[in-house]
Image: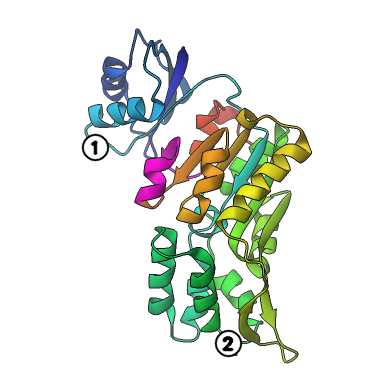
Amino acid sequence: MTLVATLISPTSALDDVALGRARAVLPGTPSAPEWLAPSSAADMFFSAGDENDNRAIAERVREALGGQAIDVVVQKPASRRKQLFVADMDSTMIGQECIDELADLVGQKAHVAAITERAMRGELAFAPALRERVALLKGLPARVIDDVLAHRIVLTPGGRTLVATMRANGAYACLVSGGFTAFADRIAQRIGFDEASANQLLIDADGKLIGEVAEPILGREAKLATLLALRARLGLATEDTLAIGDGANDLDMIRAAGLGIAFHAKPAVAAAAAARIDHCDLTAVLFIQGYRRDQFVE
């Protein structure tokens, strides 16, 4: 079985020494490196023989690199370019957790962030943890969401390029979030997604948050359902799909995708995903699909 190992450096530090170390531990006789971007990303094709654990092979390469900040993904080269992209929002397509930023405005950020962290690690059930955090926002004017979006939310580097390039090559992109539509709809538009799904914060007649979220809550099961529904709607095979996220509520959709990527993820998610990005920005997802730098759409 032929596989491809993709090595990506966020600091253009990929050199012949690093590639040589990788080649030395890959099965069979790996091909010479094929550059996707000089000093930043390269592919090596190899025959895996009887080995069928791509994650184990990738981990062996990471160990051979001696802790260098280089991401490594091993996969089958067939159907490498995906036609459906489903992405988490908070701490994936943006650098923040929106609910934590709202909580800061009522003096509850540390408390809420601690709950968020535990939920994303899978230590708390998502829905009750969300209800508990939203209840602390009761009375907050809904208009502050505009300020949070304008001054606190930062798009993850590479996200716009990732979505623009995939869509230019025929892919469909959906932002799916356990956060809130008030953020997700506008962030999806800013990045360039085709659509977005998220939870709805309930607002009273005076324009204030009532401390509740509309039911049913979009969480782990709903993210998976969104991936499966879009795959069916678009008539795609599993191998044509890509999902990315960082937290426990992303795990089911990551596992169900043709390629599931853990992005700067919680340990349990990084350990379970078929691929992981620990060091690079979101353009790494394009290199993983075999795009060269000169094929990126900015």
**Residue 57 in the image: x percent, y percent?**
34, 25
Q: Residue at x 51, y 40 (%)?
A: 255
Magenta segment includes 95: no
Q: Quadrant of residue 4?
A: top left
Is 17 or 88 nearer to us in this picture?
88
Amino acid under label 1?
Gly
Q: Nearer the viewer, mark 1 or mark 2?
A: 2
Q: Which residue is mark 2?
A: 138
Q: Secondary structure at mark 1?
A: loop
Magenta segment includes 269: yes
Dividing the image into 4 quarters, which one contains the C terminus? top right
Query: Residue lying farthest top?
Result: 29
Evaluate whether residue 171 shows in this view: yes
Q: Quadrant of residue 166?
A: top right
User: How many other residues sit within 10 Å of disc 1, few (<14), some (14-19) or many (≥20)?
Assistant: few
Evaluate whether residue 278 shows in this view: no
Q: Which mark is residue 67?
A: 1
Please determine whether, in this image, residue 67 is positioned above or below residue 181: above
Q: Residue at x 63, y 31 (%)?
A: 238
**Residue 185 in the image: x percent, y percent?**
70, 62
Q: Is residue 244 left or right of residue 33?
A: right
Q: Which residues are magenta?
A: 267-282
Q: Residue at x 59, y 41 (%)?
A: 162
